[in-house]
Image (cartoon, rainbow, N blue to C red):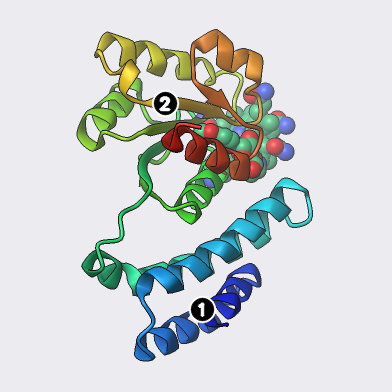
Amino acid sequence: MLQEQLSLAVQNGKAKDVVALVEQGLAAGETAEALLGGLLDGMGVIGEKFKNNEVFVPEVLIAARALSRGTALLKAQLVEEGVEPIGTAVVGTVQGDQHDIGKNLVKMMLEGAGFAVVDLGVDVSPESFVAAVKEHKPQILGMSSLLTTTMGSQKDVVEALKAAGLRGQVKVMVGGAPVTQAFCDEVGADGYTADAASAADMAKAFVSGA
Ligand code: B1M
């Protein structure tokens, strides 16, 4: 019941309700894992609706903000309960590119799917992507590019990973408005999706070996 309420509060972007419900749940002795389940369910519903054009960027951002208010409250207890993320993802917008709205959506959807996400921000050089893969050992590396003039940098990152001997350790996902499946194949990435919710689905499939 509380989980359903939490799910709905996230779907409706009601951050205050999320906080109140999480506090209520914790006080009543609910596990952080169970409460997190409600929050993630809500984000999952929003992700599906976003994919089907039933909701749009503003609704997703508001839902994600509500979700993060809830997860912030649960963080300490989740660590105590030993709840592990399903994997680690490093994300960033490629070198020369300042657009981050799509990349931020991908980050939110990945977090909503249970990943620990390291966000490198915008204008990320191939060297920085490689350094982050070395440091965080992610299962997923997600790149975003919005300009035809910067999308080539996604290939530079794949090549830099190969040169560093790291290519086999990480699934590389590419996306952004000008990116296509053909481009993904051409640069030697592992996956492309047209939207952020599908990116999270693909990342989940990669870590589960599906
Ligand atoms: Co820029 N801009 N912009 N811009 N901007 C575009 C992209 C452009 C198409 C506008 C146009 O001319 N019609 C055009 C690119 C043309 C081209 O390359 N062919 C353009 C240009 C030219 C520029 C500048 C060069 C303008 C100038 O200064 N002369 C400049 C470049 C700056 C730079 O990056 N170096 C520039 C600047 C800016 C702002 C700073 C003003 C601002 C960015 C603000 C920000 O991001 N914080 C901005 C914006 C907002 C846009 C538009 C209007 C919107 C982009 C956006 O956020 N879309 C855009 C025009 C348009 O699209 N109508 C435009 C919404 C977002 C949710 O979509 O990021 O595609 P998107 O993400 C999607 C999918 O692609 C996917 O998921 C999301 C949906 O779920 N996805 C992934 C994204 N990453 C993924 C990764 C994945 C999987 C899926 O796996 C890892």
Answer few, some or many: residues within 10 Å of disc 1's Cα (few below 14, many 20 plus, some between 14 and 19): many
141 over 52 or under it: above or below? above
Indicate the position of residue 77 as horizontal and vertical percent values.
Answer: 27, 72
Where ligand 1 lies, by quadrant? top right
- Between marks 2 and 1, how big is the CA–CA gap? 33 Å
Q: Is mark 1 within 8 Å of ligand 1?
A: no
Indicate the position of residue 111 as horizontal and vertical percent values.
Answer: 45, 53
Q: Is residue 145 visible?
A: no
Q: Nearer the viewer, residue 54 or 146?
A: 54
Query: What residue sits 24% from the left and 62% below the top?
Result: 82
Q: Earlier in the sequence, mark 2 or mark 1?
A: 1
- 1 sits to left or right of 50: left
The numbered dot on residue 18 is 1
Q: Quadrant of residue 45?
A: bottom right
Quadrant (top left/top right/bottom left/bottom right) for the N terminus: bottom right
Badge 2 element:
strand
Q: Is residue 154 visible?
A: yes
6 over 11 or under it: above or below? below
- 16 sits to left or right of 83: right
Answer few, some or many: residues within 10 Å of disc 2's Cα (few below 14, many 20 plus, some between 14 and 19): some
Indicate the position of residue 154 as horizontal and vertical percent values.
Answer: 47, 19
- The three-letter code of the residue at mark 2 reads Lys
- The three-letter code of the residue at mark 1 reads Val
- 53 sits to left or right of 101: right
Badge 1 element:
helix
Query: What residue sits 68% from the left and 52% below the top?
Result: 48
The numbered dot on residue 149 is none
125 over 51 or under it: above or below? above
Query: What residue sits 39% from the left and 91% below the top?
Result: 28
Indicate the position of residue 126 as horizontal and vertical percent values.
Answer: 35, 21
Circle 2 residue: 171
